[in-house]
Image (tube, rainbow, N blue to C red):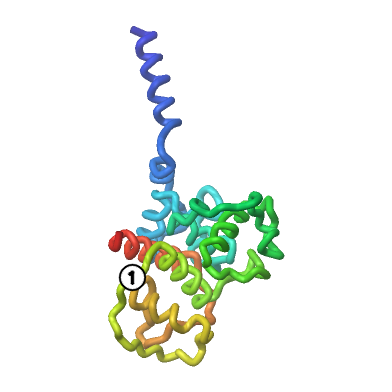
Amino acid sequence: MKKMLQGAVMIAALIGLAASPSQIYADHSFKDLTGIQEKEKIESLHSRGMIQGVNGDEFQPKAGLTASQGVTMIVKSMKLNLDGIAFIKKPEAKDVFTRVDNDAWYAEPFIVAHYNELDVPANIDPGHTLTREEFIYYLVAGIERIGAYPLPKIYIQISDEANINPSYQGTIERALLYKVTALDPEGNIHPKGPISRAEAAAMVYDAVVFVESHQ
């Protein structure tokens, strides 16, 4: 009987080790999300392995989102990959990006982002804190890489439209129509302001919901 119990315990342990990443993530929650409006969205994405914390226990929701973190979030959540792309040699980050090391933890997401046409600049600093308009631009590129979506012909009045980089104008308007972001009560988007990790995660969550609802 004792041997049978030991065997059962061993089998249970093996099943635990073989648990899917989403199950493993689901058993863990960040300790710094109390009072954070985006908490549920962050935890949902984390449970699906689409985003990660800064360390084991912290998400650091109020911290600025770096380019490396933002690109990784988008690539993972939109499930972008290199499938179907033929290469003469294995692609490396340094082939495209001047400031992304080949052995950096975020090297692969940058490679995937490039070949999926997210239009990430070749000279981008991975440690650069993304502005709201930059992140929205890359996120919408990821959304639209997956498919084309019908949009109503609606003019959206943006109070601080003059502050938007003209290259990002159309993307921000589409993001508003996709409902992955929203204007503040005064009708501003604050395009040049730094985006926090929590706000970016909320946008990613809404992007995932949008994409999945159109599949």
Horizontal side of residue 16 vs 111, given as left or right: left
Image quarter where the N terminus lies is: top left
Residue located at (66% from left, 57% from top): 93
Where residue 209 appears, as percent x and y from the top left, is 32, 62
Quadrant (top left, top right, bottom left, bottom right) of the C terminus? bottom left
Task: Depth check: give the residue in front, 137 or 186.
Answer: 137
Q: Examine the image and state in which quarter residue 210 appears.
A: bottom left
Name the image quarter holding residue 11. Answer: top left
- At horizontal 38% and vertical 65% (from top left) the residue drawn is 147
Relative height, residue 132 to residue 35 (above, below): below
**Rendered image quadrant of residue 28:** top left
The answer to whether any part of residue 65 appears in the image is: yes
184 horizontally vs 88: left or right: left
- The type of residue carrying mark 1 is Tyr
Provide residue 46's location: percent of width, then percent of height.
Answer: 42, 52
> What residue is drawn where x is 43% and y is 32%?
18
* Residue at the disc numbered 1: 149
**Where is residue 127 drawn, in percent x and y?**
64, 65
Residue drawn at (36%, 18%) of the image = 8
Q: In x, y percent, where is residue 148?
A: 36, 69
Position of residue 133 relative to residue 204, above or below, is: below
